């Protein structure tokens, strides 16, 4: 097994791209211990495999979060891929790595003012999955070089004079200098509940997509209507009655505990009818 073979398997698993980067070598951050900032503890690791799951958003007036549905799908695809590789004897560890930092450093993505990163061809409409891979007698992996044109970490250069997201953000969280994280609705999505001001301006379940909807880097990524079963699962009347299981299965249960989807639906119905 080598890089090419893994890319073929990743494609068969639904990933649009697979990048082979060096293992992470950053200083650890104590506030995010679930991320492997430095692979020194895993001396067997030869490369970081960074997988890209690209997705289509839903139209702006659809409240269903395409990102979370695809994030969940990509998670299951990466688990299945890891099992397939392990069955072939590949030593690996599925784990989170400093994805944004590595994608920028190794020329896979460019930075955006809204703190996301954009991958050429897919814009910001991507989900990353990652794992460390180790070689052996039968398997050999090597880091590759990538170099997209726009890889500057300087926001002023990469977003140039565009102000679309600054003007569109309903929370006024973005400025010329980037994102004020605590003003962004996405910052509150992992918690058990949101501050009232988030419910007041939220347009999409589990977050906000406004800055991505207006971003010219996403101009080539066309929105699609959600399939019937997904629309049914996110019917507001249904969710507001507490029938959330079908929707939770689609987006994953990690972020939707404490009746969050039902509460969002109640707010949407009350505010917008
Ligand atoms: S996700 Fe929404 S709240 Fe956060 S920066 Fe983008 S537009 Fe603003
Ligand atoms: S909308 Fe414009 S300023 Fe904002 S992230 Fe996209 S390109 Fe950069």
Image: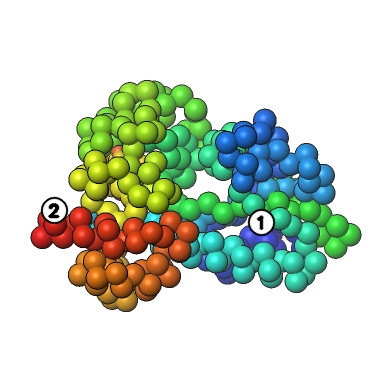
**Residue drawn at x 75%, y 71% as measured from the top left:** 87
**Residue drawn at x 35%, y 26% as measured from the top left:** 160
**Residue drawn at x 32%, y 46% as measured from the top left:** 194
Between residue 191 and residue 211, name the one nearer to us: 191
Disc 2 CB within 8 Å of nearest ligand 1 atom:
no
In the rendered image, the quadrant that contains the N terminus is: bottom right
Earlier-in-chain disc, 2 versus 1: 1
Between residue 248 and residue 160, name the one nearer to us: 248
Give the label, 2 or 1, closer to the camera. 2
Where residue 223 appears, as percent x and y from the top left, is: 29, 58
Where residue 106 appears, as percent x and y from the top left, is: 60, 37
Q: Residue 168 appears in which quarter of the rendering? A: top left
Between residue 10 and residue 263, name the one nearer to us: 263
Where residue 22 appears, as percent x and y from the top left, is: 70, 41
Circle 2 packing at 10 Å, graded few (<14), some (14-19), many (20+), is few
Where residue 12 appears, as percent x and y from the top left, is: 58, 69
The reply to whether residue 231 is visible in this rendering is no
Q: Quadrant of ligand 1?
A: top left
Left or right of 253 on screen, residue 167: left
In the rendered image, the quadrant that contains the C terminus is: bottom left
Which residue lies under the disc numbered 2? 271
**Residue drawn at x 45%, y 34% as measured from the top left:** 111
Find numbered disc 2 in the image and state the secondary structure of the residue it sits on. Answer: helix
Find numbered disc 1 in the image and state the secondary structure of the residue it sits on. Answer: strand
Residue positioned most to the right:
137
Name the colouring of the figure: rainbow
Distance between the alpha carbons at the discs numbered 2 and 1: 42 Å
Tell me: residue 32, above or below residue 157. below
Check residue 94 in the rendering and tell me which mark sits there, or answer none: 1
């Amino acid at each position: 097994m080598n890089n090419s073979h893994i890319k073929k398997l990743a494609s068969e698993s639904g990933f649009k791209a697979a990048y082979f980067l060096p293992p992470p070598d950053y200083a650890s951050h104590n506030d995010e211990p679930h991320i492997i900032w430095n692979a020194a503890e895993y001396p067997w690791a030869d490369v970081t495999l960074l997988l890209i799951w690209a997705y289509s958003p839903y139209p702006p007036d659809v409240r269903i979060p395409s990102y979370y549905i695809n994030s969940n799908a990509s998670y299951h695809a990466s688990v299945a891929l890891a099992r397939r590789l392990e069955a072939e004897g590949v030593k690996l560890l599925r784990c989170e790595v400093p994805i944004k930092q590595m994608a920028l450093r190794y020329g896979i993505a460019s930075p955006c003012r809204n703190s996301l990163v954009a991958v050429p061809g897919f814009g910001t409409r991507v989900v990353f999955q990652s794992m460390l891979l180790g070689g052996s007698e039968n398997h050999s992996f090597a880091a590759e070089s990538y170099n997209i044109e726009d890889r500057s970490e300087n926001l002023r250069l990469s977003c140039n004079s565009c102000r679309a997201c600054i003007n569109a953000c309903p929370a006024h969280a973005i400025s010329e200098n980037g994102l004020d994280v605590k003003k962004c609705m996405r910052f509150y999505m992992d918690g058990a509940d949101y501050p009232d001001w988030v419910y007041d301006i939220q347009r999409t379940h589990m977050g906000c997509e406004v800055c991505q909807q207006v971003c010219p880097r996403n101009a080539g990524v066309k929105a699609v209507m959600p399939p019937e079963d997904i629309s049914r699962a996110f019917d507001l009347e249904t969710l507001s009655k507490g029938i959330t299981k079908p929707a939770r299965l689609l987006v994953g249960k990690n972020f939707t505990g404490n009746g969050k989807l039902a509460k969002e639906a109640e707010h949407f119905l009350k505010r917008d009818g």
